[in-house]
Structure formats: structure tokens, C-alpha cells
Image (spheres, helix red, strand yellow):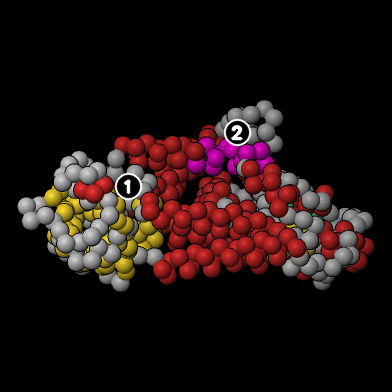
Amino acid sequence: MLGFSQTREWVYPQSITGRFTTIRRWTFLALHLLLLITPWIVINGHPALRVDLPARRVFLFGTIFTASDTIFLLLVLWFLAFSLFFFTAVFGRIWCGYACPQTVFLESWIRPIELWIEGDRLTRRRRDAQGWTLDRAWRKAAKWSVFLAVSVFLAMAGMSIFAGARELWTGRAGPVEYSLTAIFTFFWFWDFTWFREQFCSYVCPYARFQSALADDESLTVTYITERGEPREAGRQAALDGRCIDCNKCVAVCPQGIDIRDGFQLECIQCARCIDACVSVMDKLGHPTLVAYGSIAESEGRKVRRWRPRTLVYGTILLAIVATGGTLLARRVPFEATVNRAPGSLYTVDADGSTRNTFLLQITNNDPGERPVRYEIEVSGLGSAQVLTEPLELASMESRTVPLIVRVPASSDLGRTTPFEVSVTGGDGEIVLHPTFKTGAEIGETGP
Ligand code: SF4
Ligand code: SF4
């Protein structure tokens, strides 16, 4: 108890090693590398990962997505949603135990720091029970100071994705970015020092709706009641391979629950209790009593990994991936729009030819360092003349140029004639469909 709450039962999880702890450590390391390094990697002059919200641009491993790529944003959101449905149906709350930032940061930073400054479970509990002493006070102050430094570091790392790592870490980002960093710092510090497992139990929406996503055939951490019960703290239970009630699976649990009580909403499936029971039962020469399994298995039923729910989610996921892949392969790395120039419907020249003036805007989204040359051609208007020069644009450059289309007097065009403007650049082409106006539309020779 730190004195913040009179009802809070503080959890002191014991340190543990084992197979699943090792797997989780490697997973955490990979996720940290993704978070800490990708915003710093530069590909073709742009960050490997950056979400530039004010400019509505996303830089992703050498590709620049803009507002005109909203379909990809939708596909990514659908992909994330159906991944969650699919992986929860198959593997239960694997996200919570292996990839949720709350778990990753608590396990990678906070628990090792706590162990280093305050000692293991029993020492921490004993000190906290003694009330405020000088020894306890300096350790708390030291621990919270390090937690604050970690909170700042992690908030900066997270904001680097949005504000740009170089800008943020060298003081060149704006006040909004630093204000948001301060808010995230405050959140992490509050979470690390006090809120912790309560977030999973009381706030996280995923914990609430996972029961709708998982079923009794989903993978979950379970206590094998048939082998474990009746539990007994005695020699006979140890010889039989039953639960010896050593409480180690409870001591290591970061959520403060007892897996032997059955499925609980608070369980984040971190598998620490499996490693704990393996370490106990190995010494007794028996298999673990806590393992990955399912409710169906524990009831003696067969588990189908592929069942209607997982088949539907899996098929939708595959369809999303296939659609995204196809669209990505056909994606053109520039944008082009054409609009009629304001106040100019058409103009009739002295030789009787008709001119329409448009504004053509081209934006180069190619991340390459060399400028891209764009050619403009018009078709569908017979012998029309296009009075626009090809233009060259650097990466991220956008320019609006007049596009003048001139049709000779001999052309027999109606009042409104659709035609095509083709813009080619790099390996792509965009075809636009404006209309050409002539005097026949309003029965005059000019506007
Ligand atoms: S019961 Fe086991 S799997 Fe669930 S949170 Fe506790 S230690 Fe992790
Ligand atoms: S660690 Fe295993 S033996 Fe010990 S209390 Fe938990 S289930 Fe029983």
C-alpha cells in the first residue's frame, strides 16, 4: 500500500523465469526495436515510420500514403479489427500477455527497476507494511524518479512516430507535440506508480468484449483440475502429482488472481503462472498443473482450431490482405486533379478556334530523391492542341499549372464534350475526365 487508496490491495508479483517468460522477453525486445528504431531509420530521405497527422501523410518503409489513399487506412483498420477477432478466437488474450504496451512496458522496465531498487516480492511487502521509514522513503523516491525518466523516454518514443524522431529529440517539434508528450508522460507515470493491473481489470475495453470474441475452444491459461485436485500441502500430494498448494502460481501473478479459481476476466494470459507451476512440478517429477488449454479440452471435448467462427474471420482477413496487396501493386505514386479555371468557361480566338483553360494539380508522392517528370496528353477531342509543358516535381512537391486545350474552328464539337487528360510520370498513369465547352452551349461566340 502506498497510501493512495484505502481499499487497494497492492500486488507484489514475484520474479519468475521459464519458457514462456523467455518467449515474452524476446517478443518485448522485438516490439521495443520496432518502437525505438523505426522512426529514426531514413529511407529515401523520409522516416521509415511516421504518421504526420497535420499534413495527412503516413510514411511507411519507403512508401508515402496521403489523404487520397484513405482506402488503405480503411483496409488497415479492418485488418486490425479482424486480426483481433481471429487471434482472440484462436489464441485468446494473446495480445494482452505478449504485445499490449501496458504489459510490455511494465514487464520490460518497471518490474526490473522495482526489483533493482526495492528488492523482490517479500522484501517489498515487508517494507511497505512497516510504514514510512527513511529506508523506504529514499527507495520510493529513487524508484519514482527512475519511473519518471522511463515515462518521459517512452512518451518521447511514442510521439516520435507522430512528430518525427529528429524534430522531437532535438527540440525542433512544436508546442502541441511537446504538450502531448507531457500528457503521455503523465499517463505512463501514473500507470507505472499506481494504476497498473487496475487498467486491465477496470478500464481496458478489450477485456470486456473478449468474451464475445473468444469461445470455449479458444486457447487460454488453465488449471488442470482433474490432476490438481484435491490440493493438499503434503507429501502425498507431491507423490501423486496433485497441487501442493505452494501458492507460487498466485505469487507470480501480476493481476493478483489465483488461476486455480477458473477463468477470470482479470487474467491477461501472461503465462507466468505456467512457468511457476512448471518450476515446482518439475522438481517433483510431474507435469505442470497450469498450462495453455481450453475450456473444451478441460471438459474432455475435442478442440477445433478451424471452426465456423475462425473460418469466417480467417477468410475475411485473407480477403482484406488480398485486396490491399492488389491495390498496393496498382497504386500510382502521385496525385493529379483537374478543375476548370475560375471565371473561364471558354474563349474563342481570332482564328475561330475555341480554348478551355483548366487548373491541373499534380503532387509527387514518390519518396525517391530524384525529381519525377510528368507528361500531359489529351485525347478524345480530335486534333486538339495542349498548351502545357511537362513538369518536374521533387518528392512531396505539389504544383498547380494552367492546362490550356485549344480546338480548331473546323472541329465539330457539341456544347459539352467529355475528353481525357492523361498524366504519366514514373511508372504510373492517371487518367482524368473533364469536359470541353464550346459556344454552341449558350449560342454565343464567347463568354
Ligand atoms: S492467472 Fe496466470 S496467466 Fe493469468 S494473469 Fe495471472 S499469471 Fe498471468
Ligand atoms: S504452482 Fe502448481 S502446485 Fe503450486 S499452487 Fe500453483 S498449481 Fe499448485
The span shown in magenta is 188-203
On the question of residue 201 being in view, the answer is: yes
Q: Residue most toward the left?
A: 350
CA neighbours of label 2 inside 10 A, class few (<14), some (14 to 19), many (20+): some
Nearer the N terminus, badge 1 or badge 2?
A: 2
Indicate which disc residue 55 carries: 1
Nearest the eye: 283 or 230: 230
For this rendering, which residue is in front, 78 or 23? 78
* Left-right relation of 150 to 121: left
Q: Where is residue 320 in the image (x, y as percent from the top left)?
A: 56, 63
Residue 192 in the magenta stretch? The answer is yes
What secondary structure do most residues of the magenta stretch adopt? helix
Read off the residue under disc 2: 2
* Horizontal side of residue 2 vs 350, given as left or right: right
Classify residue 147 as left or right of residue 81: left
> Does the segment drawn in magenta span residue 118?
no
What is the three-letter code of the residue carrying label 2? Leu
Does residue 90 lie above or below 255 as drawn?
Answer: below
- Where ligand 2 lies, by image quadrant? bottom right
